[in-house]
């Protein structure tokens, strides 16, 4: 018996889909029959590889070069998607960056870039997409937070603040959009084996693993499964929540 997630034939937009968790989300959705579009920043070759992998496996996928910090570019791209697909059913705000350093060593640019991308990008895409979801009286928004939002991490003040803001934004949007039948939730990954976490894994491999109850790093697919769940009909009655995908990550 096939279990129907309710996602087949839906249109999803994933920001930062060219690699890592975003790519895994794109591939997961496409496997479930979703028509997936994703924004990528600059690596056209990587984006084309994702599209080729998905379409080669029989899925539907399109890559659009958009910097999520550019509100006008996000707005224009979303309008083009609406023109071509008629709707966006699922938005995944995944694009994110780290610029880790102790507070005294952080320069203004490191702080601003993290805020502009992580929380600014989430605002830009949500504002552009939500009005179309409102007119359809349905939609799913899933934002990528982090274990850093809830647990202190040395050298992560800018990143942690941006992810805490994403969780607060998620709860506020859940309240604003509930009457329009739009759910808004977060997935908060722990340490996932992607390029983003490479440096910290190289620096403190054993100490980090010792704090993870399951004693292993997560895979991008572990996070994609949670995003898929929150986008699916199985999460119809969940909004304003944070789903932790961290193997039981504990800080001292
Ligand atoms: P990654 O660095 O591998 O991928 C991030 C993607 O976002 C890249 O494709 C990048 O090009 C894109 N991106 C960055 N800035 C952008 C911009 N301005 N416009 C458009 N795209 C942009 O990182 P990842 O590990 O796949 O992380 C994905 C999300 O998960 C991020 O929000 C991150 O903060 C979060 N997260 C990751 C981890 C982890 O351990 N990897 C842990 C917690 C949370």
Image: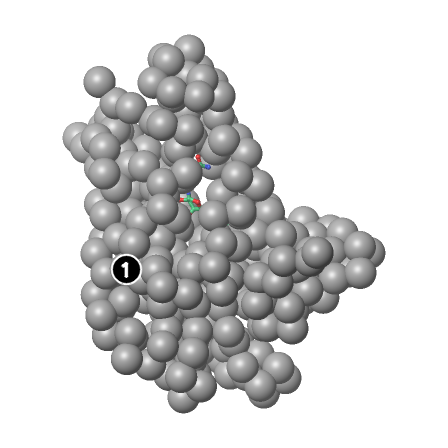
The one of 23 and 63 positioned closer to us in this rendering: 23
Query: For the point 32% across and 33% down, which residue is it?
Result: 100
Image x and y of residue 108, in percent? 23, 45
Residue 134 in the image, given as x and y percentages of width and height: 37, 83
| Colouring convention used in this rendered image of the protein | one colour
Residue 18 is left or right of residue 209, and the answer is right
**Could you tell me residue 71's position as x and y percent?**
39, 72
Position of 14 with respect to 235 (left or right) is right
Judging depth in this view, the residue of 66 and 173 nearest the camera is: 173
Q: Which residue is mark 1?
A: 240
**Does the closest atom of ligand 1 sit within 8 Å of the Cβ of label 1?**
no
Q: Is residue 227 left or right of residue 119?
A: right
The C terminus lies in quadrant: top left
- Whether residue 225 is visible here, answered yes or no, is yes
Q: Residue furthest front?
A: 1
Q: Is residue 113 above or below residue 58?
A: above
Q: Quadrant of the N terminus?
A: bottom right
Residue 111 showing in the rendered view: no
User: Could you tell me which residue is drawn at 49 percent across and 43 percent down?
Assistant: 223
Snapshot quadrant of residue 59: bottom right
Disc 1 element: loop
What is the total number of numbered labels drawn onto the structure image? 1
Disc 1 crowd rating (10 Å Cα; few below 14, some 14-19, many 20+) is: many
User: What is the x, y in percent for residue 176?
Assistant: 24, 74
**Residue 16 against residue 222 in the figure, above or below:** below
Residue occupying image coordinates x 31% and y 49%: 242
17 or 223: nearer the viewer = 223
Which quadrant of the view contains residue 171?
bottom left
Looking at the image, the residue that sits furthest to the left is 104
């Amino acid at each position: 018996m096939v279990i129907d997630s309710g996602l087949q034939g839906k249109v999803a937009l994933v920001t930062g889909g060219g690699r890592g968790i975003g790519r895994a989300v794109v591939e997961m959705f496409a496997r479930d029959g979703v028509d997936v579009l994703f924004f990528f920043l600059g690596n056209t070759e990587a984006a084309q590889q994702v599209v080729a992998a998905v379409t080669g496996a029989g899925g539907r996928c399109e890559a659009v070069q958009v910097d999520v910090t550019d509100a006008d570019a996000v707005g224009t791209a979303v309008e083009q998607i609406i023109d071509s697909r008629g709707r966006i059913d699922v938005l995944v705000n995944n694009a994110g960056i780290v610029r880790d350093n102790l507070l005294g060593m952080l320069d203004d640019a490191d702080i601003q870039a993290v805020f502009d991308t992580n929380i600014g990008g989430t605002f830009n895409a949500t504002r552009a997409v939500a009005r179309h979801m409102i007119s359809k009286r349905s939609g799913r928004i899933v934002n990528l937070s982090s274990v850093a939002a809830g647990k202190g991490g040395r050298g992560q003040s800018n990143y942690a603040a941006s992810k805490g803001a994403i969780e607060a934004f998620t709860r506020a949007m859940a309240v604003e959009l509930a009457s329009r039948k739009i759910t808004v939730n977060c997935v908060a990954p722990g340490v996932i084996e992607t390029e983003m976490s490479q440096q910290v894994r190289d620096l403190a491999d054993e100490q980090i693993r010792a704090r993870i109850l399951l004693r292993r790093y997560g895979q991008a697919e572990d996070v994609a499964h949670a995003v898929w769940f929150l986008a699916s009909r199985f999460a119809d009655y969940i909004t304003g929540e944070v789903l932790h995908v961290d193997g039981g990550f504990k800080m001292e």
